[in-house]
Image (cartoon, grey):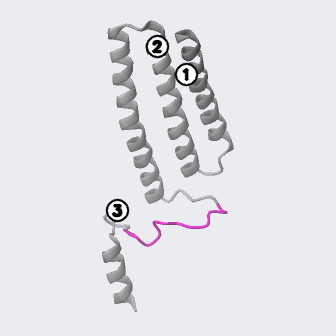
Amino acid sequence: MNELFMIVVISLGTLFILLAAVGLVRMPDLYLRISVTTKAATLGVGLLLAGTALYFFEVSTTTRALAIIIFLFLTAPIGAHLIGRTSYFVGTPLWKRSVMDDLKGKYDKRTRELMSSEEEQKRTEEQN
């Protein structure tokens, strides 16, 4: 029973990594590629590590796998956010069929600081 569960977990991890690779090729712009690869690849690698911990089923291997999973789940979204934010500030264009740009007009181009909704409302009132 444990081997069957391990096979399912490792297979799901492999599937998610495959979906991340397909998403990397199929998505039209950088921001969607970052989103797809971060979510799918992080989950895929996490499942592969969980399968490894199930396979070896030793304290040292399991704790290492859990430490790597925790580190990966903490750092991958932060890294993707920073890459996306930097790309936006540098001027990497959105997909031509994007409907909405949530950050447009909400940050100071000189200091790269985002405005809160109150600051944005105050700025709109000053312009009118």
Count of numbered tags: 3
Q: Mark 1 touching mark 2, by CB under 8 A?
A: yes
Of the pair 77 and 110, the residue shown nearer to us: 77
- Quick one: label 2, few (<14), some, or many (20+) residues within 10 Å? many
| Disc 2, SS | helix
Check disc 2 and give the amino acid type: Leu
Viewer-nearest of discs 2 and 3: 2
* SS category of the residue bearing label 1: helix
119 relative to 112, above or below: below
Question: Residue 54: which numbered mark, if any?
Answer: 2
Mark found first going from the N terminus, 2 or 3: 2
Instruction: Between residue 97 and residue 68, name the one nearer to us.
Output: 68
Left or right of 14? Residue 125 is: left
Q: Could you tell me the amino acid type at mark 3?
A: Arg
The magenta segment: 96-107
Residue at 43% of width from left, 59% of height from top? 89
| Front residue (pair 117, 33) | 117
Mark 1 = which residue?
9
Q: Quadrant of the N terminus?
A: top right
- Picture quarter containing residue 109? bottom left
Q: Which residue is mark 3?
A: 112
Q: Which marked residue is nearer to the observer: mark 3 or mark 1?
A: 1
Is residue 126 rendered magenta in the image?
Answer: no
- How far separated are the C-alphas under marks 3 and 1? 42 Å
For badge 1, the amino acid type reads Val
